[in-house]
Every structure is written in C-alpha cells, then in structure tokens.
Amino acid sequence: MKAYFIGGGIGSLAGAAFLIRDAKVAGRDIMIYEAQPLVGGSLDGAQLENGAYSLRGGRMLTTDHYECTWDLFSGIPSLERPGLSVREETVAFNAENPAHSRARLVDRNRFKIDVSHMAFSARDRLELLRLTEASEETLGASRITDWLSPGFFESNFWYMWQTTFAFQPWHSAVELKRYLHRFMNEFPRIETLAGVKRTVFNQYDAMVRPLVDWLKQQGVQFARGTRVIDMTFEQEADKLRVRQLMLDRDGRNANVRLEDGDLVFFQNGSMTDASSLGTMTEPAPHLTKSDSQGWALWETIAKGRPEFGNPSAFNGSIPESYWLSFTVTCRDRRFFDQMEAFSGNRAGTGGLVTFKDSNWLMSVVLYHQPHFPSQPKNVQVFWGYALHPDRIGDFVAKPMSECGGVDILTELCGHLNFDRAVFEDAICIPCRMPYITSMFMPRHVADRPLPVPKNSVNLAFVSQFVEIPDDVVFTVEYSVRAAQMAVYQLMKIDRPVPAVTRHDKSLGVIFATLEKAFA
C-alpha cells in the first residue's frame, strides 16, 4: 500500500505520523507532495536574506484542549530537550513562563483599560445566550451581526475575543457559537489569556521540525517543488476511487498511477494561500488565488461533486477574509524594555496587547526570547497584526495595506507614545494574507466535505476546510483531528480518536462564565 499526501502542512504531517504509529504503515511507502520549498504550511517561521525574521502568524495552544495534537506530540521527541517529547517540553516551558496579561486592551490615551468586567448590557447578555443556544441548523449561513446588536461590538468582551481569535462581525455565526462552546473555560479568564500556551520557539521550529525529523527517520519521502494539478477518478457503483494523480514538478508534468490499496490525503484550501511579504519601504504585494493556484485542485475536483465541498464559499471575498501581520526584528533592547515597563509583563508572559481605538485595530505580542533557535543574543523578535488594514491609520495617512515597515512602526509608536528612536535599528516585515480567515466565512453545512466523504473509497480531506462536529477551525487541533479521523476511518483502526473535551458541560465552568458575564 502507498499513501500520498497532497500538501505539506500540519494535517499531512500528522496524517503520515498516524499512519506509521497506529496503522503500522512503513514510512518508505508514504509520499508528501509540497509545492513550496518548505513543509509546515501555515506553521512557518524563517530568517530572511537581510537577517530579519518573518512569521505569518503564531498559533495559540492550550493544554486544556487540543486532544489530538497532544496525542500526536506526546510521541514526537523534542529537538531541544533530549529525553522529552514535544508535549512534555511545551508543558515544562509554560510552567516556567506562565501567561497573565496585564495590558490586554489599551485606549487612545495610552491607558490600560479595566477588563475585569465584560461591559455587557442586559441586551448583550440575552442575545449572546440566544446565539450560544441556537442550533447550527437555525444559524445556517447567517453572520454574527444577524444575531448581535451594534452595542455588543463595543464591549470589552468582543474586543478581547475578536482579537484573540481573529473574528470579524461579518463572519459565520456558527463558528462563533462553536468557539463559545469549545473555549467556554477561557471566557472567565479572557482578560489575562492565562489559558493560552506557547511553544519554546516559533511553531515551525518547535513543532514542524521535530515532526518532520521523526517522519524522515521513519523513511517518509518528501517531494518539494511538486504541485498536484488534477486527479482522475474511477466510478465503482456509487463510490469514487482516485486512480491517478497528475503532477507538476517544477514545470515538468508527471503522472502517478494508484493501485487498489493506495490512499490519497488532500489538504484542500489554505488560509495562508497567496501570502506575500513587503519590506521596510514597500507594502506586501496584493496577490490572489490566481497568482498562487493554491485553491485550483479543490475547485477542479469539486466541480459536479457536491460531496467534495464548495470552495467558493470560502475564497470568494478577499475583503472579508484578509488581514495583515508584521514581524519586527530589533537589534537592541530599547523597545522591549519600554514595552515591558508599560505593559507590566516580561516578554513571553503577556499575550496580545490590543490598541482598542486604533483605526487598524492593531495588536502586538512580545514573544519569549529567543523565538528562533539561531537568534543572536542581542536580537529580539515580536509580532503584530491588524484586523482593519484597509482603513487610514491614526498616525500614518494611508491604509495599512499600502504601508511598508517604516510606516507600520510609526503607527505603533504613535499608539504607545514611544520615541521613534526605539526602532532605530529595527526591521519590520509586513505580510498580507488574503485568505487568512476564510475558514470563518458564512457557509452552509455541505460547503465543507467530511474528512472521508461517504462516496469516497480512497480519498480523504485533511485541512481547515472539512466538517468536524463540535471542533473549531483556525487551530492546529482542527487539522490534526481531521488527519486522525481520516487515517483511522480509511485504515479501519480500532482505536478511538480522542474526544473533544466538553468544558461547556462542566457546572464549574458554566457558573464561572455566568459570574464573569454579569460582572
């Protein structure tokens, strides 16, 4: 039996590991195709040619959730701490660096806002309860604004929840409901982000590299610079079987014939597709799926096959799914020292600082240093993002989408009232991501395929764009869970997939949530 993975993101890497660990498939019989030079998908992190570092984003983890992720990484050895698994390393690191934000929201006058209360009105509470208790059938493809009044979007809760998870008011009401249930135990501590866990380094170095290293040791093959451009199917009664993969290998076409026992795992869609980087003086180029072809295969095989989902529900409106992030590389400690003094948090313990009145709705986070294994001691790296990049800045008279790094640092200094000299020797790299919240777009239930569609013999989908009841997209866990479900179903593995922890069924969590909501 051969197993072929299309895309080298965390879903494919996890699926390959589950095949080896739980289905006893030999690593040499597993092939992972990736169009980019590096695998890891959205879990990226790299040093650029000019010496600056770049991250598209940083996934927040939690040890109270992510059941499939920790099931996987409990068996993957750490590259930094011999004798520990990645999970053990992460738990130990967070015990040494507990999170407790002291400056979650900051107003236009540079005052830290009192976020011990959610600033709900009675109407806000009733509407939020109604949304939380509505069935997904009732919610359908409705938007959050269909259920909550304008005043709700001025509450402390919304600013914190929105920027923690990157929701927009026009996003799916179903996805917000799922988040409210999945992370209900985070509601009582949302102002401190105490439940958020982070890895020792950026997630490429802390999670992807150890997993890839383990897979290579098992003999898994990686074909970089290789794009799968089409599949041919064979009809078997009411079932479909993939019979051939058509490849583009650096401009050369090739075909792979599949035998009866062979399997295909496809990462359909990508939230970081068509990402682009800017410079200190130039904004990030405005790319789309037509430039990257990252959605093309899903669009091709879904035509006439509704069981394979509907990609246009997710990639059809860039203005509603994109935002910009930025990574700043500092070569002295001036900014970090002033930011730590202002926030009251040592780097790595504070989480997001959101400038609530910012036109761009800008947030920044100071990571524990070093954030990269090879990072020099005199260098610090932090990350930020903005949910409204098309609006004119407060201190820069143009939208963030037209800004280079110099402009972004000027805007940040304006919100903090810092002298621009704190960034005298810094490099800021803007990053545009047109589909970064495409998973949150309003959708119908059939728009996402099941991990293994009912009519599929040997094709599974492992990505953020599949349907998994009760779990939430925009998490590492969602891709890993999809991969584990797909592998177990296709390989008929007699081991249960770890269940979603239902904190929303805990009386203690419910009472703590109600207490916070009425504070």
Image: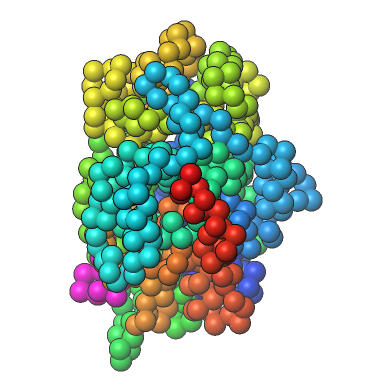
Q: Position of residue 99 (x, y in %)?
A: 61, 38
**Where is 476 relative to 71, above or below?**
above
For residue 212, side relative to residue 418 (left or right): right
The residue at 58%/80% (across/down) is 493
Q: Is residue 424 magenta?
A: no
Residue 304 in magenta?
A: yes
In this image, 362 relative to 73: left or right? left
- Could you tell me if residue 13 is visible in this image? no
Looking at the rendering, the stretch of residues picked out in magenta corresponds to 301-311
State the image quarter where residue 488 is shown: bottom right
User: Residue 385, relative to residue 193: is it above or below?
Assistant: above
Res. 333 visible in picture: yes
Please report the residue visible at 43 percent of the width from the left and 56 percent of the height from the top.
179
Q: Position of residue 298 (x, y in %)?
A: 30, 63
Nearer the observer, 433 or 277 = 433
The percent coordinates of residue 336 (x first, y second) are 56, 19
Residue at coordinates 49% horizontally, 54% vertically from top-left? 514
Name the residue furthest right: 83
- Camera-nearest residue between 239 and 329: 329
Please tell me which residue is depicted at 43% across the width and 13% down the height of the picture. Answer: 417
Asked which quadrant contains residue 386, the reply is top left
Front-most of 474 and 147? 147
Question: Residue 151: percent from the left, percent from the top?
Answer: 28, 42
403 or 420: nearer the viewer: 420
**Left or right, 61 with reference to 277:** right
Q: Is residue 237 above or below residue 278?
A: below
